Image: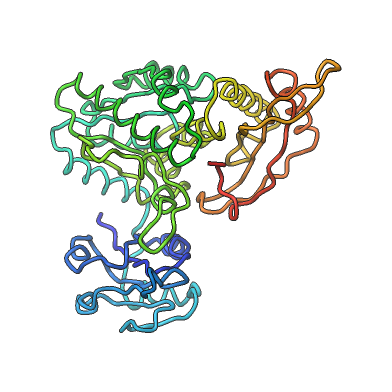
Amino acid sequence: MKQDMIVILDLGSTENTTIARRIREMGVYTEIHPHDISPDELRKLENVKGIILNGGENRIVDGTPVDISPALYECGYPMMSIDHPTAKCEKRLDTIPADDVLQGFVFDVCHAQANWNMKNFIEDQVEQIRRQVGDRKVLLALSGGVDSSVVAAMLIRAIGNQLTCVHVNHGLMRKHESESVIEVFQNQLHANLIYVDATERFLGKLEGVSDPEQKRKIIGSEFIRVFEEEARKLEGIDFLGQGTIYPDIIESGTKTAKMVKSHHNVGGLPEDLKFELVEPLKQLFKDEVRDCGIELGLPTSMVYRQPFPGPGLGVRCLGAITRDRLTAVRESDAILREEFAKAGLDKKVWQYFTVVPDFKSVGVKNNARCFEYMVIIRAINTVDAMSASIERIDWDVLQKITDRILAEVENVNRVCYDMSPKPPATIEFE
């Protein structure tokens, strides 16, 4: 069933996702599009029932207020304007509308139907994938994380054995991560899986690189290069499947919003990309991705697996990556995950991990002065990854984790706990 859609046009608001999520919670599908969308582009969107012009603090770009094309007003769609005094709309508001006002516009003015749900979304995406791919083949980067796993399940439902999954070990995986991916997807789910160990290749490219954005883009570019090489060994690979989700796109910046950080599957793609992209999750928030996975029949343990960034431990080994600090991140992360599981926190805390900065602090070991790294623990809770709160960990649990890290991880003499929510901090350090 084609879902009715409300389109939110971004005229500089920081609340686009808030409004989009509230409308989706009403059972109506929404998408956020740039303010300069053309009438032809708008008409290509299916089942549009109304438009919200969402202005705000970022509406002034290069000294000029952004606005929509005047031709959009003649397209015949009901419109509601928020903080946008020049718009010729049926309804105009100065603040984020209350639920009853929003519901009135969506249902009474736009006459949208509440037919947004995961079953319908999956049916639509399967149909779109089949239309896009036809009888050709797709190559998918399968990290084993939630996003790539759900994409794999979606593609398997849509095109079956036309999908080839590639798992790349870039040397930035968590402890035993690659072994787990092979066991689950190849041995248990019998996926068509190719394993590539590119550890030395990635670490060589990243040697001496300290800028977080440059690291992300190097990792993203190398990923694509590896897939291109694997595709050349196969026949008829025309598409690259990716687990891009909505927060990735939003945080990578829009025409009226500043970039928070680029994501490896949004801003790091090389210009000479040889594949057409298949991104069936790019309009979903993280909690919706999990709902999608459950609807597709994936096991709960996989769907609620710890989130893991595409650049892996590369953005948790802060600054220029060194092998000793990379080992410290990997080993301390394994201890944290083991102790959280023992304490039942793995089912309570949305995301938890360790990072190791690129500086040392003085300490004492074996009655002698030492100069070693610190490990920082981060544990947060969130619904959609757009904001996050800090988990209050029991002191005894933190003490046990600290004792183990100091005793078992080499080159570490200090453990800290990060108390910063998002915003102002992001979930990851880089």
The answer to whether residue 353 shows anywhere in this view is yes
Q: Residue 414, image x and y in percent?
A: 74, 30
Query: Please, which residue is most extreme toward the right here?
Result: 367
Q: Is residue 112 left or right of residue 344?
A: left
Relative depth, front residue between 3 and 44:
44
Q: Residue 38, image x and y in percent?
A: 21, 67
Q: Residue 131, image x and y in percent?
A: 16, 43
The answer to whether residue 354 shows anywhere in this view is no
- State the count of labels: 0
Which residue is at a point 49% across and 40% down the rendered structure image?
212
For the rendered model, the colour scheme is rainbow
Q: Residue 144, image x and y in percent?
A: 43, 28
Q: Is residue 325 left or right of residue 232?
A: right
Q: Is residue 375 above or below residue 16?
A: above
Which residue is at a point 71% across and 39% down the rendered structure image?
417
Q: Is residue 171 left or right of residue 32?
A: right
Relative depth, front residue between 324 and 170:
324
Q: Is residue 217 left or right of residue 75?
A: right
- Residue 392: quarter of image: top right
Q: Is residue 290 above or below residue 413?
A: below
Query: Please, which residue is most extreme toward the front here?
Result: 208
- Residue 374: quarter of image: top right
Quadrant in which the N terminus is drawn: bottom left
